[in-house]
Amino acid sequence: MLNLFIALVSCVAIAMTACSPATEYDIIIRNGAIYDGSGGDPMIGDIAIKGDTLAVIGPLENAIARLEIDAEGLAVAPGFINMLSWANESLIEDGRSQGDIRQGVTLEVFGEGWSMGPLNEKMKAAETEQQGDIKFDIEWTTLAEYLDYLTARGISPNVASFVGATTVRIHEIGYEDRPPTPEELERMRGLVARAMEDGALGVGSSLIYAPAFYARTDELIELARVAAGYDGLYISHIRNEGNQLLEAVDELITIAREAGIRAEIYHLKAAGQANWSKLETVFEKVEVARADGLSISADIYTYVAGATGLDAAMPPWVQEGGYD
């Protein structure tokens, strides 16, 4: 009798499975080599998307979707992050971002030293005068207003930004080669706090360009300390990537330690063959700092080239006061 009962239950279960409707999603990507970002080997499988949510990863033979994509022979991965993006103006011209989207980039991160806010009226006038082929009205003041402006225009990628240490310096001091007064520094700290409250990722510096290289280490510590209070990050195109590379790395580590902030060296390199051997010492310095409890990281280019403006080769005294 027991065996008959089990058999009947099994038959009912099979019948219910056969009759139940297939799960429906908006999109199913089938048969792709799925890279989940963990660094492991890919797995061949299916991905279901419902709305803006990745709903299921795995075999989905019985599922259906309004759009099904056969990705056999192709790689499927999370969107890539362009962590040093200068699309802050090109997205105003063309929000489709086809150059990056077609390479898999879904997040553009701005703010390596300069950010599109906070701006005062003098900064807006200067930015308008310096515009090249891309012309636009500056309709925002804060960093959050700029990001909202992009979103309202309609853009393909997600966007985020650090607040630029250069930007808040220009806001209060302009292009003068001097430290801020206590009152100016407090206003600069307030600008960073406002940006962090509005969603900035942290503070970014780019210390080989004017007027950023007029900032002393203690000024950067004060700005980074504000960002640390919001669990922000300090990123930096460090002060020197050539003969004073080691000193520049020491400065970043000092800022991280004194401000209590996570820090990242942007596009770490040793410029000039005479400095190539210094990279091993850089690695040692970072490892020692990490062993001491600091969160220090670095990123590099995926190629052996670099590019910047001619102004980066000019001495600081030439650039004091801005450009005429």
Image: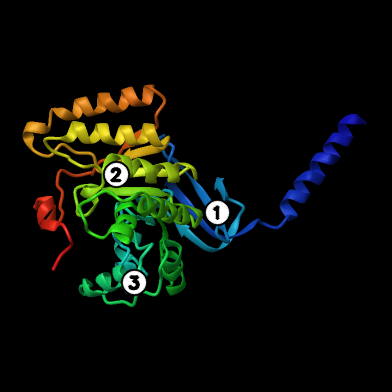
Q: Earlier in the sequence, mark 1 or mark 2?
A: 1
Q: Answer left or right for 155 relative to 219.
A: right
The residue singled out by tag 1 in the image is 48
x and y percentages locating residue 36 in the rendered image: 45, 42
Residue shown at 30% from the left, 28% from the top = 286
| Dot 2: element | strand
**Foreground: 186 or 278?**
186
Image vertical order of residue 322 relative to residue 80, above or below: below
Mark 1 touches mark 2? (CB < 8 Å)? no
> Whole-Å distance between the Cαs marked 2 and 3?
27 Å
Mark 1: which secondary structure?
Answer: strand
Q: Horizontal placement of 19 versus 71: left or right?
A: right
What residue is shown with label 2? 236
Q: Residue at x 16, y 54 (%)?
A: 308
Q: Residues within 10 Å of mark 3 (few under 14, many from 20)?
A: few
Query: Going 24% across and 42% down the picture, which residue do you hit?
Result: 238
Q: Amino acid at mark 2?
A: Ser
Q: Amino acid at mark 1?
A: Ala
